[in-house]
Structure formats: structure tokens, C-alpha cells
Image (cartoon, helix red, strand yellow):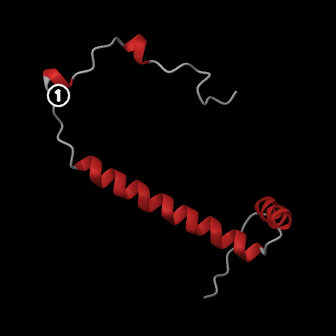
Amino acid sequence: MTLNVTVPDAVYRQMAELAARQQVSAERIVAAALAEQMAGRASRDRFLAALDKVPAAEPAPEDRLQCSVSEMAVPLSWGASY
């Protein structure tokens, strides 16, 4: 199937440079990017659908976390980009 799209020059240049570095066609880069975007959307939609099934209720006492908010905080060094 053929699809014609218009993209900004800067986006086209980045895509062409990526295709050259990976030694693949520009069409393959675009197809992969679209497939990745569609897969991400589907995953998000499935996640939100599953989340909608979770009852909006407080956890039972035995299911509550027994720590303070400060103990739950994740240090900035964990996966943070500066």
C-alpha cells in the first residue's frame, strides 16, 4: 500500500540520517515508526481498559502498605536523566 505524507524538513533529515546509519530504506524507518506507534497505542488502550475494571475502593486493611510516604519515594538516581 502507498501512503504519501508531508513532514517538516528537519524530521525528514533525521529520518534519512537514521536510515543511512542503520543501512535500511527510509520507507522501512517510517513503517517501523508507525508500527511502533500503533503498538504503543494498543498497549495503552488495553492498559486503560484493564484499569477501568479495577474497583474504586480503598484496599482492605491487610492489603495496605505498611510504610510511610518517604519510604516509598524513589531516589532521583534511579533511571533519572539529568
Name the quadrant containing residue 26: bottom right
Q: Secondary structure at mark 1?
A: loop
Residue 52 drawn at (x, y percent): 24, 49
In the picture shown, does residue 7 fall above or below 67? below
Tell me the residue at 15%/33% (across/down): 57
In the picture shown, does residue 50 fall above or below 61? below
The residue carrying mark 1 is 58
Residue nearest the viewer, comparing 61 with 16: 61
Position of the N terminus by quadrant: bottom right
Name the quadrant containing residue 68: top left
Tell me the residue at 17%/41% (across/down): 55
Residue nearest the viewer, comparing 5 with 22: 22
Tell me the residue at 62%/22% (across/down): 77
Q: Amino acid at mark 1?
A: Glu
Residue 9 drawn at (x, y percent): 81, 63
Tell me the residue at 71%/74% (across/down): 28
